[in-house]
Amino acid sequence: MLDAQKIAFQQEVIEFMTLMATRNRPELEKKSAVLIPALGSYDDKDAQAMCSFVNGMTSFFHSKYTEAREHFLCVSENEKLSGSLRGIALLGQGLTCRSAGNLDEAVTYLTSATESIDPKGMFRSFLMYCFQQLGDIHASIHENEMALHYFERAYASAGSATEGLPYLRYHMGLGSCYLNLKEYEKSKDHYYKALEVKDMPATVTSRIENDLGIVYLETKQYEQAEKYLSSSLAVREANTMDDAACTSMTALAEVFLEQGRTDEAFRLLNRCATLVEKFETKGKKLQVFKLLAHANRLIQNYEQAILYYEQYIALYAQLKREQERNIFKFKNKQIEKQRQIIADKHRELAETFDEIKRLKVNRKSALFSWITIIVLVVISELFIDPLIEDHAYNNILSLSFKVGIALLFKPIDGLYESVLWKRTMRKAA
């Protein structure tokens, strides 16, 4: 593949990812239908890697997470590929893990992606998606300071735009952080700013409407909550965004339960239960069990409520164990990485210190060497030269004296260095 063709295909992949981020389903389908065969027709490792990435993202968009991960693994584990290509595949794996509810794995993959993607390369815009996802994950587990840090990095990596998708996602991220902090007015303010961004497809605004609905749910403004959550759910169902639709369903079901509309809540939760089972999204499954238990308790079906509570507790304990184990493993990797960095820095400093000591010794040695030369010259002029002149008839003896004087310099110089080095080392110790 020629360099020009490779650059053109890279640009196509970047545009494909933009469609993915905006959830523009019609254009996304059209793009992948053309791009996958085109990339697959080239017997080139980079083209094949980009083809696997597009295939993986297409599978991810259709909630086929196992299939998506297989495509991404083909790229991320291929050490013959550039870091950026492996990095965008790691992003894909992070997205997949997050949607499947494996947040610890998602953080590991996304962090690796930020370290692999060249910030000055063709795929530098993918860093924004990595940081945004990391921000969303930390916001979802109420680590708000880390979330804000990642949202700021996402915004900065996009060039701190004042419009368009980066601007929208920045305000969405801040909205979710303030929602976690129970600062509802600030949260609403950022979500409304995100809604004001022009030319965004309904699939993107459905996410903002969902989150706004949750703000109103938590502030017990159920009519407003129902308005936004119903709108979000309608868009997601119309675009067959089943996994995202589950999020809106559970929140809307909670609104119905608070309003005493248990039949409507049961209909949503039963539909949602089928979908989360299909996609194996454990976090959403946990929420469904909790709400079904609550709903059955409200209608005094206590036996069924207890069964759902037991399922909720068992799944919660399983997820907690898995998360703690994987987070511990992740933290260990981070600690080991930091330890290695510290060890490398210590080694570099030790080498620098040794070099400084060596230079210091050499300077002192040079000074004493010059003094030695001057002393030898004086001794030679005052004592040795007259003696040689007295025996000038003997050329061999004269030459021997001169050579002896010259040969004295090196041992004396070495002696100076040895003595000075030992003294320096004793001081350092």
Image: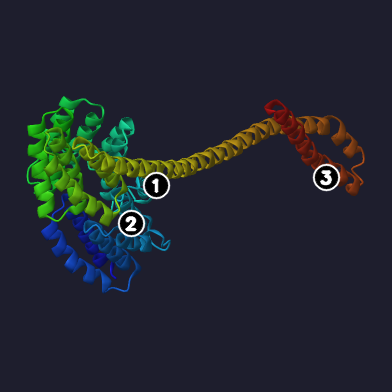
Report x, y in % for residue 331.
46, 40
Q: Which residue is mark 1?
A: 108
Query: In this figure, which residue is indicated by the disc labeled 3?
Result: 403
Q: Nearer the viewer, mark 3 or mark 1?
A: 1
Query: Of helix, strand and loop, which one carries label 2?
Result: helix
Q: Which mark is residue 412?
A: none
Q: Left or right: 25 with respect to 104?
A: left
For label 3, the crowd category at 10 Å Cα-Cα, with few meaning under 14, some 14 to 19 and many 20 or more, is: few
Residue 377 visible (yes or no): yes
Q: Looking at the rendering, in which quadrant would you find the N terminus?
A: bottom left
What is the spatial separation of the Cα atoms under label 2 and label 3, in whole angstroms?
Answer: 73 Å
Q: Quadrant of the C terminus?
A: top right
Location of mark 2 (residue): 89
Q: How is the image coloured?
A: rainbow
- Looking at the picture, which amino acid does disc 1 mark? Thr
The alpha-carbon separation of the residues under discs 3 and 1 comes to 71 Å
Q: Is residue 242 above or below residue 354?
A: below
Mark nearer the N terminus (2 vs 3): 2
